[in-house]
Image (cartoon, rainbow, N blue to C red):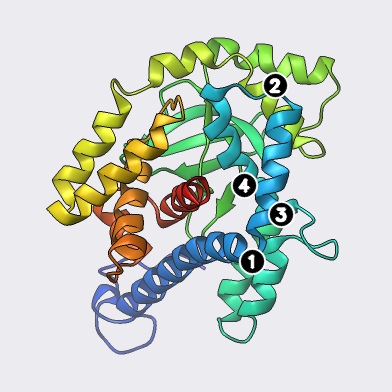
């Protein structure tokens, strides 16, 4: 069936133009779907950390130790591992966190939304190269393993550098694709070398992602130095100062200084850190009400990225 133009008569027979009639309902339904799926991105991460924090944390730490992940790469490695573990780890009775999350949501959510979330379980991490730039925050990417192409949307404040390879897990949100939680950038000049190393070592991304990710990140030290924001701790605190009250800022600054004192962080994306600090100081220290989507929006990041950093902060400080 041909697509109905906005100014054409509405197919329902009302006599009105499509844009003034049923198009509004379609747009509202699409918007509601986007909002619901976004809510579940955050909800899944929160559910996984609330119920399987020890199991996932233990597995991540074991992999970091086993593959001797350098401190500069540790944060990115942990973020991508958390995503992989939510979809594919054995946390209880041979099942992954997403299986238990779907079970909890059954009967509470529309089947159409649950179908979208259920498809994430089939999502495996891969490596992607840029084909073209669709607009400022949307890129056409090609999976280097399957040659399949995806139109992927990024947060406008956290865009990949032109030409870099990207590693991570892409999920479908009902309207577009996006990386779940985080992605790693691989310098263009090193991408093929890293892929060749995987082939030579007979490492399969799907079956042995923890080891594959170590190989993909193994030559990123230089790239990390180039991409790092100058004086990252100051940049995070500057964002907080711009967006938080004095009371929240003072608590967040104290937490941040305590957390960074024992860590040599290389921060590519300061927004999730600032948002997580704001949320932690507000909710856990000052006992004031705040929602992750609300705080994430203020800092131009996603609720799922905020949630991941929030859990890392809480774990480190406990």
The numbered disc on residue 51 is 1
Residue at mark 2 = 215
Of residues 89 and 170, the one drawn nearer to the viewer in this rendering: 89
Quick check: can you spot residue 268?
A: no
Q: CA distance from mark 3 to mark 4?
A: 11 Å
- Judge left or right: residue 48 versus residue 206: left
How packed mark 2 is, by other alpha carbons closer than 10 Å (few <14, some 14-19, many 20 or more), is some
3D distance between C-alphas at marks 4 and 2: 17 Å
Q: Find disc 3 in the rendering and name its residue.
A: 55
Local SS, label 2: helix
**Earlier sequence position, callout 1 versus callout 4:** 1
Q: Are marks 3 and 4 in contact (CB under 8 Å)?
A: no
Q: Position of residue 168 (x, y in %)?
A: 59, 38
- Left or right of residue 165, residue 32 in this image: left
Name the residue located 64 percent from the left edge and 41 percent from the top edge: 81
**Numbered disc 3: secondary structure:** helix
Name the residue that disc number 4 marks. Answer: 82
Task: Measure the alpha-carbon separation of dots 2 and 1.
Answer: 30 Å
Residue density around tag 1, few if under 14, some if 14–19, many if 20 or more, within 10 Å: some
Q: Residue at x 46, y 55 (%)?
A: 307
Alpha-carbon neighbours of circle 4 within 10 Å: few (<14), some, or many (≥20)?
many
Instruction: State the residue in front, 268 or 165.
Output: 268
């Amino acid at each position: 069936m041909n697509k109905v133009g906005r100014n054409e008569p509405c197919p329902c027979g009302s006599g009105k133009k499509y844009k003034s009639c049923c198009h509004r309902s379609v747009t509202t339904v699409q918007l509601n779907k986007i909002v619901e799926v976004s809510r579940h991105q955050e909800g899944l991460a929160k559910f996984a950390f609330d119920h399987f924090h020890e199991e996932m944390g233990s597995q991540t730490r074991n992999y970091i130790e086993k593959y001797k992940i350098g401190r500069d790469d540790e944060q990115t490695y942990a973020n991508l591992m958390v995503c992989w573990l939510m979809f594919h780890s054995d946390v209880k009775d041979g099942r992954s966190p997403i299986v238990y999350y779907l079970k909890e949501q059954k009967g509470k959510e529309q089947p159409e939304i649950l179908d979208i979330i259920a498809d994430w379980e089939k999502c495996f991490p891969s490596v992607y190269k840029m084909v073209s730039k669709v607009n400022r925050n949307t890129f056409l990417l090609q999976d280097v393993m399957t040659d399949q192409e995806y139109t992927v949307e990024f947060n406008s404040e956290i865009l990949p550098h032109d030409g870099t390879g990207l590693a991570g897990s892409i999920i479908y949100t009902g309207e577009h694709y996006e990386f779940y939680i985080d992605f790693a950038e691989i310098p263009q000049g090193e991408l093929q070398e890293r892929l060749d190393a995987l082939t030579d070592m007979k490492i399969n991304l799907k079956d042995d992602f923890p080891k594959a990710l170590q190989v993909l990140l193994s030559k990123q030290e230089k790239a990390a130095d180039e991409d790092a924001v100058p004086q990252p701790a100051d940049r995070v605190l500057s964002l907080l100062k711009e967006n938080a009250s004095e009371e929240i800022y003072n608590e967040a600054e104290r937490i941040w200084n305590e957390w960074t004192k024992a860590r040599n962080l290389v921060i590519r994306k300061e927004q999730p850190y600032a948002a997580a600090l704001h949320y932690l100081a507000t909710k856990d220290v000052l006992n004031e009400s705040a929602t992750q989507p609300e705080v994430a929006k203020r800092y131009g990041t996603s609720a799922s990225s905020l949630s991941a950093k929030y859990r890392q902060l809480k774990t480190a400080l406990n």
